[in-house]
Amino acid sequence: MFKQRLLLLACSQRKRLDAGLMPAIDRYDGPAFRLLRRFLKQGAVQPPVVKIISAEYGLISLDYPLPYYDRRMTKERAKVLQPGIIAELKTTLSYKTYTNLLIWLGRDYFEAIYGYEAIIPDTLNVQIALGGTGRKLSILHDWLYGDSSNLRNDPNFASTGGKVRIRGVEVNLTSEQVLDLARRAIVAGERGVSRYQSWYVPIDDQRVAPKWLVSQITGLPVSSFVTDEARRVLAKLGILVKRV
């Protein structure tokens, strides 16, 4: 019996500029949506139900036809949307019996689901993705791919990785997962990628700062650890670190 999962995802500021209407899964083009599209294309037998909180349209599904728009979520806007979103979420929860819910939202978006705890069934396991963008992407990746029985063919699960702790944060990723997260963070324009001195990580045709990379996969600020600690973590995860 498959476990039915529910993902509550914030819309992204980055969108495709194509004219006309596009399904939400294609219109939104932030890192989380790129990760989700890649997962769905790999043939999940029982993909999660995904609901998106849009600053313009409220709670929508992946196939909701969207034009291009430019509206950011604010606390004031979230309060306006909150009654409708809670009502739609309650309806969604009534259709199926879900076992797991992942909430992947930015700070202002949480205002739009204020009071959601009252409509969550006792049997539903709720996880909230916290931390920086890299850390939240790691949580989303693990949540999507966590049950390998749901996948027909995912090459990441054939790779060896490691488990290591740094400053109280445990990392358990394969080298491919680390590199994938790094590439998405680079595309997203995360700052500090090239701020290295004596050591760097080669990723495709770019040199990446080891501390930046460890910050992306842990959510820790780069000021909270030193380069030697970053090198140790990356070595354990199978990531090559080179001297300049």
Image: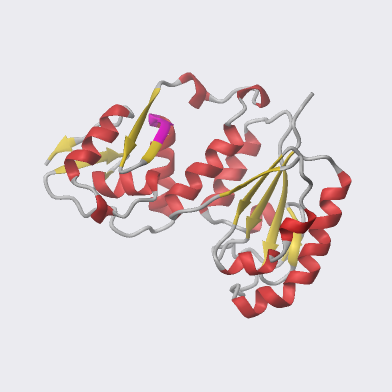
Residue at 59% over, 58% down: 105
What kind of secondary structure does the magenta stretch mostly adopt?
strand
Residue at 60% over, 72% down: 73
Image position of 243 with respect to 121: above or below: above
* Left or right side of 91 for 169: left
* Left or right side of 63 for 75: left
Image position of 157 with respect to 170: above or below: above
Residue 179 visible, this angle: yes
Position of residue 206 measured from the top left corner of the image (x, y, whole percent): 28, 45
Residue 188's image quarter? Answer: bottom left
Image position of 162 with respect to 10: above or below: above
Residue 75's image quarter? Answer: bottom right
Number of numbered discs? 0
Image position of 202 with respect to 43: above or below: below
Residue 208 visible, this angle: no
Q: The magenta stretch spans which residues?
A: 171-175
Task: In this rendered view, identify the residue nearer to me: 28 or 217.
Answer: 217
Quarter holding the N terminus?
A: top right
Residue at 68% over, 68% down: 112
Quarter holding the C terminus?
A: top left
* Left or right side of 147 for 228: left
Residue at 72% over, 56% down: 117
Position of residue 60 measured from the top left corner of the image (x, y, whole percent): 76, 59
Position of residue 67 measured from the top left corner of the image (x, y, whole percent): 71, 67
Task: In this rendered view, identify the residue nearer to me: 123 or 63.
Answer: 123
Q: Quick check: is 92 in the magenta stretch?
A: no
How are the colours assigned in the image?
Answer: secondary structure
